[in-house]
């Protein structure tokens, strides 16, 4: 076999980066559980027709076929890999609604796949961490104010740059567009969604070409999109544009409440930014995007919103709201900037040196005594000279080497300090017990 | 959308089962780390030609294609989902050998996919938890004795039936077959591997048909396969068969050492069982299978072995040994027998009751004070009557309901006990802090 090479868009972290990723995921998961979200994993595959319900994303789907199956076309039973965790969750809700308690709060941390062209911070396989709340028939609005607070709590304890969550409300945009007479608000949203990428002039053209807007209507839509504020003053700025519509009023009241709730619990976290539209068609209320300070140009690392119609049959309806942290995306950016480090390359805290191969059993007993008290321990691979055994520890960042003897001794190989020690009671300093994750120095 | 239905072979646990799965995986992961294994995740896909290197498994592979890609045949760039974690790990080693420290100890806990016919305990998508040690050029034998001890430690603390690990050594079988003159030892191994499924008569026929064995040779191979012992006495039983071969002697010495090491650290864990062959061709030394007591008829829940030639190029060679816990398989069997339960359906320990919607901010402050001290807390979804709010907690198994007031009070809704409490200091009993996983009562 020749030496294999990486596959573009399918990142693989080396073990130290994977340890950082686990640390981040553990923190996120622990926070989600503190807020009472229950864990869920859905299968990686969905029926292809479910994945294609929203035509926009069809180009991104990976379709599966069993190697030995007869040549299959795009038949009804074809399966594809999920491209997000929201569509599978909505399907899960409908499939299991009789067994669930509503409102249902779940989190889901899983890989998703998209056949997009890979670029920095954009992968074909990546890890998402989602929370959603769904209820039967109606969903109280206050959950829309809760989502950003959970994310801020989850990411706030990590050694990463601060985040800023940008919020908007589909009702504000749709009500406003209706108020100025734009007849295709979804096309208008899709045009405004491109503002950061193509600039106001091209968006104005798009609004006229695809949403049937007049020049004055396009100008009004752009004026709305320019409004941004960290407090309720954005609502005054919207009203100053002189557009009247009941849906607009409802959206403004909701957005004010989301911003004010955040300012109470987490000042500086949220900004109402009326250009935020989210590409997906299924959002119907609050929408979220998130910027990582210093990495704004790479786009949102955490997005979501309220969806009223994603999980519904003819007779049942489960409105929901959710937000999704792009874990791979965020870590890819931070790893690319060397902005996260870990204190060692292995979980191991202690290497037990091996005087001679016939001492292996005794050395394993020492290791077991340490492990029993939660101290990650390896026994040296071979009874080489102690200098070589110490280098085994050094190259991996293992801080302690244990020398069996009468009595045993343990050496901190960073300082050179060596002391007598008993495997039944010796304890490393708390900061050495596990690898420590830090931000850039 | 009509109500969706499950897809055969792709299990989805409900949240309480998923909590149990996470508990099991956390325990496994923590144990792996205590032994110094570093975490790794590889991408879900491998080049199809890599997956098909061993022809035997080609029928099981799911092939990927992007929906919008031109019609693709089985071209060189085609990707398939990995069917185990060993083949991707061997590829990762070759790809990154220059960046890794050897011997390299890693664990990997990920989903794998096989297009097999689903049956009880056999899935098309399932979770595996693997450890492997690889070294450059040569790998010390003692790692083959370590693998079963790590697994026993990982599973030993869980409320599941005890396990028994069956070990054999390929060198014993191959040396013995050579010693009796069977010319195709791989075909012989594949035949003996079917012993439990098809019985000795059919295996004898297979040995004659596919491995070129005479009747006497087939009888000798079956006599070897019948030997089983929990201590080194198996070696005497083999020698009593009167077959002489240097590879047989080497294999017996190794197998004795694996059994004796286990009997020192974990008496009763291991049994040398000379019919264990493992279907895969790449094993070259010790092989492992594992039975869960009471579930023997469903086959092995944890398997692996030593492989000398899986990761090698023309100039480099990375022999390894590994073992893989079939997490989905094991849990599927236990869930099917209702042999694992959890004390509640959500992580939540406390529900803060909501006197009126305008108290939400104050109730969220209570919740934040509790969460800050690690107590999972939700605020009630609506200001319904307290009876209804208590039922919200009851239906989910949330043990405590918090009533804001002057002073606040907290009620254990199982006992009905209600006491004054301060969110800054109240602590639930340790056993109520998190959901508790138990075995069948």
Image (cartoon, coloured by chain):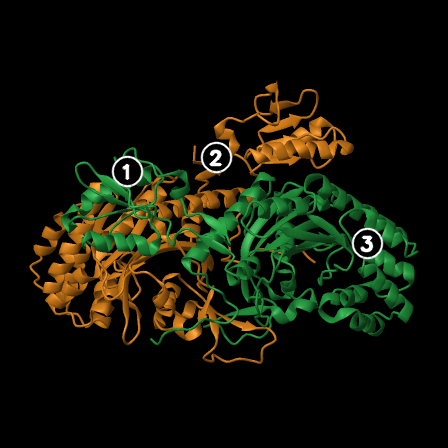
Chain colours: A green, B orange
To the question of a shared chain for discs 3 and 1, the answer is: yes
Residue tagged 1: A369
Q: Are marks 3 and 1 in contact (CB under 8 Å)?
A: no
The answer to which of marks 3 and 1 sits earlier in the sequence is 3
Tag 3 secondary structure: helix
Q: CA distance from mark 3 to mark 1?
A: 62 Å
Image location of residue A360, percent across then percent down: 19, 47
Whether label 1 touches label 2, CB < 8 Å: no
Query: In terms of depth relative to the viewer, which is nearer, B5 or A43?
Result: A43
Chain hosting mark 1: A
Mark 3 falls within which chain? A
Residue beneath disc 3: A171
Q: Do labels 2 and 3 touch, CB within 8 Å?
A: no
> Nearer the viewer's eye, disc 1 or disc 2?
1
Other-residue count near label 2 (Cα within 10 Å), few / some / many at <14 / 14–19 / ≥20: some
Local crowd at mark 3 within 10 Å, few (<14), some, or many (≥20)? many
Q: Secondary structure at mark 1?
A: helix
Residue for badge 2: B436
Can see residue A412? yes
* Horizontal and vertical percent position of residue B418: 61, 19
Report, in whole angstroms, how far the alpha carbon at label 2 lies from the one at label 3: 43 Å
Q: Is residue B64 above or below residue A164?
A: below
C-alpha distance separating marks 1 and 2: 26 Å
Q: Classify mark 1: residues with Cα within 10 Å, few (<14), some (14-19) or many (20+).
A: some
Residue B7 position within the rendered picture, expressed as x and y whole percent measured from the top left: 55, 58
Between A82 and B106, the one lying in front of the other is B106
Q: The C terminus of chain B appears in which quarter of the rendering?
A: top left
């Amino acid at each position: 076999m020749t030496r294999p090479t990486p596959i573009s868009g399918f990142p693989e972290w080396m073990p130290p980066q994977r340890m950082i990723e686990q640390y981040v995921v553990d923190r996120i998961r622990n926070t989600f559980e503190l807020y009472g979200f229950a864990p869920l994993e859905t299968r990686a595959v969905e029926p292809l027709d479910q994945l294609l319900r929203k035509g926009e994303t069809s180009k991104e789907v990976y379709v599966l076929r069993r190697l030995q199956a007869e040549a299959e076309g795009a038949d009804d039973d074809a399966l594809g890999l999920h491209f997000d965790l929201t569509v599978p969750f909505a399907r899960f809700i409908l499939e299991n609604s009789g067994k669930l308690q509503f409102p249902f709060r779940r989190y889901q941390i899983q890989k998703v796949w998209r056949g997009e062209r890979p670029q920095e911070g954009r992968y074909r396989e990546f890890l998402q961490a989602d929370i959603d709340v769904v209820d039967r028939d109606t969903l109280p609005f206050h959950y829309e104010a809760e989502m950003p607070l959970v994310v801020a709590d989850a990411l706030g304890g990590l050694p990463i740059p601060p985040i800023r969550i940008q919020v908007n409300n589909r009702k504000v945009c749709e009500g406003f567009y209706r108020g100025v007479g734009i007849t295709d608000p979804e096309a208008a949203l899709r045009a405004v969604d491109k503002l950061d990428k193509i600039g106001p002039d091209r968006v104005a053209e798009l609004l006229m070409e695809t949403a049937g807007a007049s020049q004055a209507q396009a100008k009004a839509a752009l004026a709305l999109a320019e409004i941004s504020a960290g407090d309720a003053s954005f609502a005054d700025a919207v009203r100053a544009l002189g557009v009247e519509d009941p849906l607009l009023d409802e959206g403004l009241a909701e957005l004010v409440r989301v911003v004010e709730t955040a300012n109470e619990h987490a000042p500086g976290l949220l900004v109402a930014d009326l250009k935020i539209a989210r590409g997906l068609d299924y959002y119907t209320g609050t929408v979220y995007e998130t910027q990582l300070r210093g990495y704004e140009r790479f786009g949102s690392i955490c997005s979501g919103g309220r969806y009223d119609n994603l999980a519904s049959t003819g007779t049942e309806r489960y409105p929901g709201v959710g937000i999704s942290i792009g874990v791979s995306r965020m870590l890819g950016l931070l790893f690319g900037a060397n902005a996260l480090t870990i204190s060692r390359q292995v979980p191991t805290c202690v290497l037990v040196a091996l005087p001679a191969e016939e001492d292996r059993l005794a050395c394993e007993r020492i290791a077991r005594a340490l492990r029993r008290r939660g101290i990650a321990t390896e026994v040296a691979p071979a009874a080489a000279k102690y200098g070589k055994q110490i280098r085994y520890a050094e190259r991996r960042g293992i801080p302690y080497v244990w020398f069996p003897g009468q009595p045993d001794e343990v050496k901190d190989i960073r300082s050179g300090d060596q002391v007598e020690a008993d495997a039944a009671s010796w304890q490393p300093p708390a900061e050495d017990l596990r690898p420590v994750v830090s931000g850039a120095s």
